[in-house]
């Protein structure tokens, strides 16, 4: 901001000099060519200062935009929220595994019926699963 103010004051000074040179009658000490050269130099300096000022304004706007985007990306999550999210993800993963494994068990239904140990294990899982479902209510 300070740099922009400095550029503004420089522009004002240069514009005043240009106006003086354009309106001042030619003096004997300075030839018309010298005045034109000085006018050209000051005009170039003014144009350069205007470009630098515009560049500074653009840079400041970019910085503000980046800062705004950075602030928008900042999301604070409490420990409890993070634990809840983690627990939900684990539960979802476990359900997906159970669904996949259940399909495998269904496909091997005949094998399970023929093996007494597998049949007992499925019965135990059924009881555990029913207890779990009852506890959800």
Image (cartoon, rainbow, N blue to C red):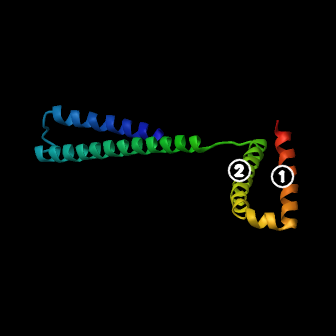
Left or right: 17 with respect to 61? left
| Separation of marks 1 and 2 at Cα, in angstroms | 20 Å
Q: Residue at x 58, y 44 (%)?
A: 73
Q: Secondary structure at mark 2?
A: helix
> Is 21 or 129 nearer to us in this picture?
129
Q: Residue at x 75, y 50 (%)?
A: 91
Residue named by callout 2: 92
> Is 137 or 26 nearer to us in this picture?
137
Whole-percent x, y for residue 82 in the image: 74, 46
Whole-percent x, y for residue 123 in the image: 86, 56
Left or right: 75 with respect to 80? left
Q: Residue at x 13, y 33 (%)?
A: 25
Instruction: Specify which label sits upstream in the sequence, 1 or 2.
Output: 2
Residue 31's quadrant in the figure? top left
Q: Secondary structure at mark 1?
A: helix
Residue 108's quadrant in the figure? bottom right
Whole-percent x, y for residue 127 in the image: 87, 50
Query: Which image quarter is the C terminus in?
Result: top right
The disc placed on residue 126 is 1
Q: Residues within 10 Å of mark 1 (few under 14, many from 20)?
A: few
């Amino acid at each position: 901001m300070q740099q922009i103010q400095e550029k503004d004051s420089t522009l004002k000074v240069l514009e005043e000099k240009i106006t003086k040179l354009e309106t001042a009658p030619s003096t004997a000490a300075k030839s018309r060519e010298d005045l034109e050269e000085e006018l050209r130099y000051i005009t170039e300096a003014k144009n350069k200062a205007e470009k630098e000022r515009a560049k500074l304004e653009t840079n400041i706007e970019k910085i503000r935009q980046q800062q705004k985007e950075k602030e928008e990306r900042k999301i604070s999550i409490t420990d409890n929220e993070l634990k809840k999210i983690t627990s939900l993800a684990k539960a979802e993963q476990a359900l997906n595994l159970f669904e996949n494994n259940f399909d495998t068990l269904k496909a091997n239904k005949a094998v399970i019926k023929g093996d007494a140990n597998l049949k007992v294990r499925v019965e135990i899982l059924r009881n555990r699963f029913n207890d779990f479902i009852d506890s959800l209510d």
